[in-house]
Image: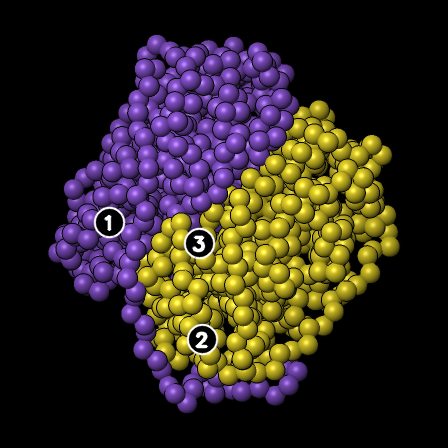
Amino acid sequence: MSAPTSHRSAEEIGRTERGPRPLPELGEHRAAADLASADTTLPSGLRVIAVRRASVPVVELRLRVPFADPADSAVGSTHCAVAEVLANTLLTGTARRGRLDVDTELALVGGELDAVVDPERLAISGNALVSGLDTVLDVLADVLTGATHPEEEVARERARLVERIRLARSQPNVIAREALQEHLYGDHPFAKEMPEVAEVEAVTPEQVRELHARAVLPRGSALVLVGDLDPEAAVAAVAQALSGWTGEGEAVRLRPLPEVVGGDVKFVHRPGAVQSQIRLAGRGLTRTDERYPAFQLANLVFGGFFSSRLVENIREDKGYTYSARSHPEFTPGGATLLVDADTASEVTAAALMETRYELAKLGMVPPTDEEVDTARRYAVGSLLTATSSQGGLASFLVNLAGMDLDLEWFAGHPVRLAAVTTEQVAQAALDFFSPGSFTGVVVGDAELLAPKLRALGGVVLP
Amino acid sequence: MALPELHRFTLPNGLRVVLAPDPSAPVIGVSVHYDVGFRSEPEGRTGFAHLFEHLMFQGSESLEKLAHFRHVQSSGGTFNGSTHPDYTDYYQVLPSAALERALFLEADRMRAPKLTEENLRNQIDVVKEEIRLNVLNRPYGGFPWILLPALLFQTFPNAHNGYGDFTDLENATVDDCAAFFDTYYAPGNAVLTVAGDLAVDEAKSLVEKHFGDVPARPVPERPSFAEPAPKGELRSEHVDAHAPMPALALGYRIPDPVHDLDAYLVYPVLAGVLTDGDGSRLQQRLVHKDALVVDVGAGCGLFGPLEARDPDVFTITAIHPAEHGVDKVLTAVDEELARLAEEGPSEEELAKVTARWVSGMHREHDRLTSRTLGLGASELLFGRAELLYELPGKLAAVTADQVAAAAKALRADSRAVLTVKPAAGGSE
């Protein structure tokens, strides 16, 4: 490359006359302001959490309705397909409003609402200028109690859903996720995150309306509001707007998952792939387990953030991957520890070997005081930064509500992290990170990958 | 709501500084925007600006390799960087107790980054993995930001692949890095932004303490990247080995945001009228009424509005089942544009777009990362960090006649039409 003028050499650039300088100490930590909040269960059984964070004149809304398949099996059940069509037609019409009215009324208050469903819950999220909170609650109440799932909207959304499923199933990460879920959980409904095309095509408006009447229930559900609001007044506004949302029974929670048991990794062939997806899974811990803070720190040291052993090894030392990470996924009554990396075909077997090596090493060469302290400060600080916006806080709180946890858990977590000892982290490393307790999948081109994976072992090839 | 206060000053070495205090949470955002992006890469070195961004994290005089990550994260912070057509940004968001540390980290790599052969080779591998992940191994990878400029533009700076070709990346040398740094990473070619929980006087003296002795260097003359709009409709087809169905991207040239901001800002409003929400015109026509596409979107800029100087792009993109040919989709788009040009949007359509913009901007600025980066980019590209806070008002002032005229300016005889064809032909 020709530079327009003469330039210094890399060596000259990298040093100054004064030489290296010391890293400044951290200043005084300022505690986050106490958040004014209200946490109430309405007579309908809906739990409402409202938190004042007045940084911008906006309100964020998150509603979580447990929405598990009562048939309790991924095989032969149409629940997943009907639930998907329900979520996609929830905002397309009521007795009082057509699809356009819903969009127009929300838009005029700077708002939006969106519904998505997964094997655990139906989630409705939205936001608006805070001056439009009443409008958003009115639309929300209307769709919860009066969605008609109109015939033509069901037909159109069904067709779109089929197209979207095709698009999703062409994505490598989706292919890997579906293969992993099936490998881990078999016919447990948690494994079925996306319906089959034929199942979607068979869904009728009657089935959707029937599921809505039976399963969209306030009891067991939680609504979180965060924004420039008075918490008590916001709860009162919810109580009034949603007073018509009642129902017999309780929203259906997913039954606990079978525990992840270690074993061979399953290979999934994707012809023509130039990169592979490595997805490992082992048993994790729930947030309420007293060993959770130690487990959380052990995970960070392993692969839970950039300054982790896994990232430093397979990215920053060897250049095998752009991103590698490990993270817990919380499931009903439990948690799974997931390890993900996407790597070029030529280095996939080597990356899998290094990942297993780092898993074993975490137990054998346990985290040092310095590693634990780095992870601890990151855990505390990232909780602060991730929840310093209205949207971030609302999403975090609604997930906690799904585990029957509250603001108190959130506020108390830095204290729990502060109390963890290096020995406790070492114990968690031994208990949860041994390579033998992991299984998983590798997606890639078999022609390129098979010889080395066969030599490495522990991979079931086609 | 009162506009947040902004303080700005320039150090003797030319570094421009923006301070944006906000005490609502004990967190702080620090960013540095350098006035160089992938438009400034020379031929034969595609992807170099982005590769160099990776190297800025690999150590400096006071910081060993990996130390930057550890110091940010052990302070409880997050970090990243990104390369755009006209700038490269670096940021950290941390508890405010770590303000001085964050300034130190940014200053040290502005003063004396360690550019080594070992780190260069390692990061070439990492960048190649990033490209495999985001482009080569993924359906619709690089669509449309890599593929569309190659069709719409004729000159190398505007048309080339900003992620880079593997051969060019592999040919990069440490001396290329030294030349790039000395040319473009001068303090006078950068903007430092600090937003969040800060005291102005204290922050100012910390900035002076850490950045004050970064030596001044000449700032390169910024060339014009201007080129004429296409004279005719340009078409090309891209075969995608992984895509399950066809897609198309339309690219149009739009006014210069630096020299004609008011004219430029009509286009984000137009994008809202066309594709924002179920009631928008193209959603209504293409998704709901004719059911021609799975999804449709429109917007300004390949990375968002006000993210680049002239020449910038207006895009309309759609993914559609193979049974609806591209011309059917194009005809419907052109009919809707013609109808909008003829009758203009209603007052209600404009009110909807404006309210969602206002709300959306508040929400974006509530995330400290977005606010810090937005202020820095506005200061660098437009010399006006406060533009960020003025945008809702400016967008609300856009009239129906202006939107109609902008719709009329999206002419079929001066645009790029990029189609994506699945290798398997688009059937199952």
The kind of residue on which mark 3 rests is Asp
* For the residues bearing labels 3 and 1, Cβ distance under 8 angstroms: no
* Residue designated by label 1: A414
Q: CA distance from mark 3 to mark 1?
A: 24 Å
**Rendered colour, chain A:** purple
Which chain contains the residue that carries disc 3?
A: B
Residue at the (55%, 32%) spot, across then down? A111
Which chain contains the residue that carries disc 2?
A: B
User: Where residue B148 sits: x, y (%)?
Assistant: 70, 53
First in residue order: circle 2 vs circle 3: 3
User: Where residue A338 sits: x, y (%)?
Assistant: 33, 45
Which of the 4 quarters of the picture holds residue A352? bottom left
The kind of residue on which mark 1 rests is Pro
* For the residues bearing labels 2 and 1, Cβ distance under 8 angstroms: no
User: Where residue B262 sits: x, y (%)?
Assistant: 73, 51
Mark linked to residue B177: none
Q: Quadrant of the N terminus of chain A?
A: bottom right
